[in-house]
Amino acid sequence: MIITKQKELNKILEQLKGKSKVFVVGCAACATKCATGGEEQVKILAEELARNQKKVTGTIVLDTPCDMRIVKKELLNNEKAGQAESLVLLSCGAGVQSIAQVCPEMGLVPALDTLFLGSIERLGNFNQYCSLCGDCIIDETGGLCPVTRCAKALVNGPCGGAVNGKCEVNSDQDCVWILIYEKLQKNTATIKKYRKIKSNTSISKPQRIKTR
């Protein structure tokens, strides 16, 4: 799922400078699970905007704002949304851009920062386990991605700097290659296989965050 965090209210208000009528849009999928764009967060933000002299013409939580079909069906011809000068969007960047494509005449204010593709540890706690590199090798590494979970994005085994099973770059992080070795002890042939080194210029470092 896409992990997001809400922008500070002052930043949202800055984007709304000169706009008095707004319509707040949430996301029932990823942003709801992140507690950044569900029914509760939409209601709270609408109330905060109203307290800051913005007229909220209405709110909606779309099932998946990144699905243009849903945007066309539920938002494009929404009368209350049409009354607003800006849509305030509690969704990831994909949702914002889908709405921008379907509703090109509407002013858009993204109210969330999109962080990474993550896995849920427990509600509110998320880990980055995938970098969307487009060349998946986890069939060879026990279902664990070294491209994302290794601080150096090594695809050919550990760097040798791990201490007590922890990464030398981040001592709070398990060395993923040690985890891979422990998982594949009965099939070490895949560990010994040489893999073409990936360019890590577009690979983000692994993250763990709490959204609440």
Image (cartoon, grey):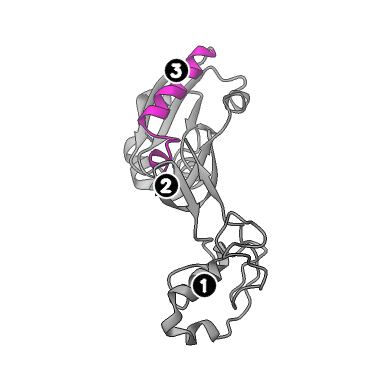
Are discs 1 and 3 less than 8 Å apart at CB?
no
For the point 50% across and 38% down, which residue is it? 104
Q: Is residue 168 visible?
A: yes
Q: Position of residue 21 (x, y in %)?
A: 49, 19
Q: Position of residue 103 (x, y in %)?
A: 46, 38
The numbered mark, 3 or 2, whose residue comes first in the sequence reads 3
For the point 63% across and 77% down, which residue is it? 197
Q: Residues within 10 Å of mark 2 (few under 14, many from 20)?
A: many
**Residue, disc 3:** 47
Please give left or right for residue 75 compared with residue 15 in the image: left
Q: Amino acid at mark 3?
A: Glu
**Residue, disc 1:** 135
Name the secondary structure under disc 1: loop
Mark 2–mark 1 Cα distance, whole angstroms, equals 24 Å
Q: Amino acid at mark 2?
A: Cys
Mark 3–mark 2 Cα distance, whole angstroms, equals 25 Å
Are discs 3 and 2 less than 8 Å apart at CB?
no
Does the magenta segment cover residue 37? yes
Q: Residues within 10 Å of mark 1 (few under 14, many from 20)?
A: few
Q: Amino acid at mark 1?
A: Asp
Q: Residues within 10 Å of mark 3 (few under 14, many from 20)?
A: some
Q: Nearer the viewer, residue 3 or 85?
A: 3
Between tags 3 and 2, which lies in front? 3
Name the secondary structure under disc 3: helix
| Magenta residue span | 30-52
**Residue, disc 2:** 66
